[in-house]
Image: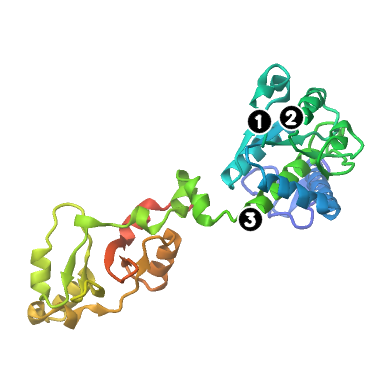
Amino acid sequence: MSALPLPSGSPPPDSTSGDVSTSGIVPAERFEQLREAREILQLAAQSLQNVARRLDDRFCHAVRLLLNCTGAVVVTGMGKAGLIGRKLTATLSSTGTRALFLHPAEAVHGDLGVLRPGDVLLALSNSGETEELCRMLPHVRRQRIPIVAITARETSTLGSQSDALLATGSISEAGWFGLAPTTSTSVMLAVGDALALVTCRQRGFSREDFAQVHPAGALGRRLCSVSDLMRRGEQLRIASQELTVRQALVSHQRAGRRTGAIMAVDETGRLAGLFTDSDLARLLEQRRESQLDRPLTEVMTHRPKTISCDSPLADACKLLADFHISELPVIDGLGRPVGLIDITDVIIHMPEQRTD
């Protein structure tokens, strides 16, 4: 069987596969597969660049319509465009824009009743002539619901009836026959994502807002705040800096889960220092047991690193890592300790990082 050199930029051949020689030569049919795959991706990339250049003030008008929407952004599309629409519905909902999906075929059989004044319709159709979708438009117009359209041509039925048209232009589909929606749906998804994210930014949707709607999974764990994870209440060991080390240790014994650090406070209740299990071990290793009966203020770490309870947990993790510490006091606006972040809790809480 004939063989060809590996295309430029290709990864080294997998010597365990059994069909590629160690000289970097691949069979001709695999070379053709790689060539075709690259052409498909390059076509999508070029189409996206073309659409990016086409964007004009109509995109800004679409953003304004979404920002001024007092109801919901109702996303609709048929077939592959409908699948893209469902994804955009999720993107809008997770970035601060209330959204729901309406299937065009179900819409003309009663589900049009979901539309209300104050809504905005985001309609997706590459041709702009999708029968089920076009049958919806007169009803939508009668309710004076603004229509944002992502479609190829301004002269299409959908394009001509839209209030804000995001025209993608003529797009060649990828593949041997060039018939299945491929490049057009990639472009449709990218334009919809751009619309959602620009609207999100204009709305002032913050990182904290994003965390509120992503409480679960690895993403939710990365976005939670210090107050979500910090130890508090009876789990804390807080003592006057004038107590001796021994007194502080004995008087703050806790059954079960507790912190490995004593947060020392001054007469006003403000955090003055931190005495950790590592500090205790260091006293014993250095045979300085006599200091166990000296005030905490003589052996504690003065002015330890601290964080506020409403800070992102990611900021706490950075402090722990940058300064190689295991405990991080959490203070309120007056400098009083209200919690503590322990590195063991962070390790358990944060998502696993794959190394393979």
Element type at marker 3?
helix
Residue of label 2: 143
Q: Nearer the viewer, residue 182 or 22?
A: 182
Residue of label 1: 116
Horizontal and vertical percent position of residue 232: 26, 57
Element type at marker 1?
loop
Pointer 3 local density, CA inside 10 Å: few below 14, some 14–19, many at least 20: few
Q: Is residue 245 left or right of residue 70?
A: left
Pointer 1 local density, CA inside 10 Å: few below 14, some 14–19, many at least 20: some
* Residue drawn where x is 8% and y is 72% of the image: 246
Q: Are marks 1 and 2 in contact (CB under 8 Å)?
A: yes
Within the image, what quadrant is residue 306 found in? bottom left
* Residue drawn where x is 69% and y is 25% of the image: 103
Q: Are marks 1 and 3 in contact (CB under 8 Å)?
A: no
Horizontal and vertical percent position of residue 271: 26, 73
- Check residue 217 in the rendering and tell me which mark sits there, or answer none: none
Q: Nearer the viewer, residue 150 or 262?
A: 150
Query: Reading the chain from its start, which is encountered first: label 1 or label 3?
Result: 1
* Residue drawn where x is 83% and y is 50% of the image: 51
Within the image, what quadrant is residue 239 found in? bottom left
> Could you tell me if residue 76 is visible in this image?
yes
Within the image, what quadrant is residue 337 found in? bottom left
Residue of label 3: 201
Q: Residue furthest right?
A: 155
| Three-letter amino acid code of the residue under disc 2 | Gln
Horizontal and vertical percent position of residue 344: 31, 58
Query: Reading the chain from its start, which is encountered first: label 2 or label 3?
Result: 2
Q: Is residue 56 left or right of residue 100?
A: right
> Could you tell me if residue 355 is visible in this image?
no
Q: Is residue 44 left or right of residue 242?
A: right
| Three-letter amino acid code of the residue under disc 1 | Arg
